[in-house]
Image (tube, rainbow, N blue to C red):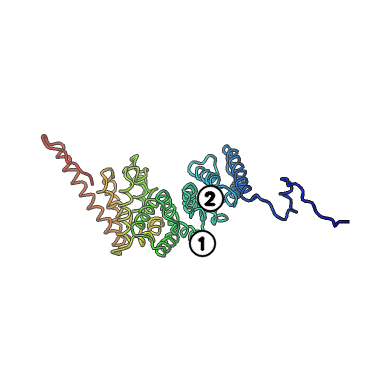
Amino acid sequence: MPPLTRTLSGTTIRSWWSDNNTIGVTINLHAVAKPLIRALHGRQARSLLKASETEPLSIERLELYVGYLRGNYIASSAKARILQELEERIRAPRFDGDVKAILYGLNPLHMDLLCHFLASEDPTIKLPACYIAQRVCIQTQEISHACLLECAVALLYSPYEVTTEAATLDSLAGICWRGFGAEIVANVAGSAAMPPARIDQLLSSVVTLLVGAWSFRTLCEAIIPGLGPTDIPAEPWTVMYLDQMLGNRPVVSRSAIWALRQTIAVKPIPSIEVVRHAPDIINTLPHNPARQQFACWFAATLILESEAFPYEGMERVFAGAVRDPANDARLRKAARFGIERAATRREYQLVLSRVNNSPGEGVMGGSW
């Protein structure tokens, strides 16, 4: 009898997918499965966001978002949409507690994830991540040195992109909200060989953020802490932010930078050193001589920088600072400089009034 032999059977789809097939499958399963997984997770993420639109954001819901953000097989578009949702909830909270849930839900447990997105080259991911990181740095009561260092490294060592540069600088300014954060940024910027022009832009962002919430009343109280309501002119602009009152944010930033340099009193001083000292001068407690000096130099500069600045009310504050025997010599010097600026402004206003009232004469133009 002839020996038994195996007869080849016809090939079928089932036989090719069999584990017993020694040749193996002819289709790359991963090439098919990964896009499908991304599509399914993306649909789930969009459904979750849609269902959450009319609900307060809880820590539990945030953890679901974080699960998608950490997923390896989640499309970048889905992650970008989640980050944009978090950014929108911070900028315009829909419910009480939204901002707190995001900020304290991310810090400190998920700061590593946020830092990862700060280094992203995808603008749709990096832009919302920069804003979220800035608010975490400013609005949370505690944040570790390690977290700030990781954020600074991610931002300063990521590739330069025009579309994300402003957001990057604003996020770095948020890190500089605290004194030790500014120290970290200054050190990392030095090791990263940050170009001088970019350092100047960073300084402008830092100062704009630090004095962004200052009003005329804040400025007066920074010079003489404890001023009562009757000591400050009761005008509508006393509670307006300075950049709103003057209508010129660059003027406010430029004046504050000059005032910081005068307060530090080290000439010439590199811009990165001004960044290093800025929060310890501007964000310090009342009755701090450095903060009082800064406020004097700052107000004195604004008197001639903007015609909208109320120099007469500020002049009375300067005079009070000069008369106070408890103030040190540097503070009184800054206050006297402010009085001189106010006198110059008064002379200008007088000349301008005479010219305007003289028949046949042109109106004096120009601005400070």
Q: Give SS at disc 2.
A: helix
Name the residue: 85% across, 57% down.
3
Q: Position of residue 168 (x, y in %)?
A: 43, 52
Q: Nearer the viewer, residue 333 or 244?
A: 244
Give the residue number, with chain letter if any, for mark 1.
Answer: 146
- Which part of the image, by quadrant, shows the N terminus? bottom right
Check residue 212 in the rendering and tell me which mark sits there, or answer none.
none
Farthest residue, direction left: 360
| Front in this rendered view, residue 204 or 260 | 204
**Residue 289 visible to the viewer:** no
Outermost residue on the right side: it is 1
Residue 136 at x, y = what percent?
50, 52
Q: Tag 1's secondary structure?
A: helix
> According to the image, label 2 marks what residue?
103
Tell whether 285 sits left or right of 96.
Answer: left
In this orientation, does residue 196 appear? yes
Which x, y percent locates residue 68?
A: 59, 48
Query: What's under tag 1, amino acid-wise?
Result: Ala
Mark 1 neighbour density, 10 Å: few (under 14) some (14–19) many (20 or more): few
Q: Which callout, 2 or 1, points at the residue further toward the start of the chain?
A: 2
Label 2 – label 1 distance at C-alpha: 17 Å
Q: Is residue 15 left or right of residue 337?
A: right
Residue type at numbered disc 2: Leu
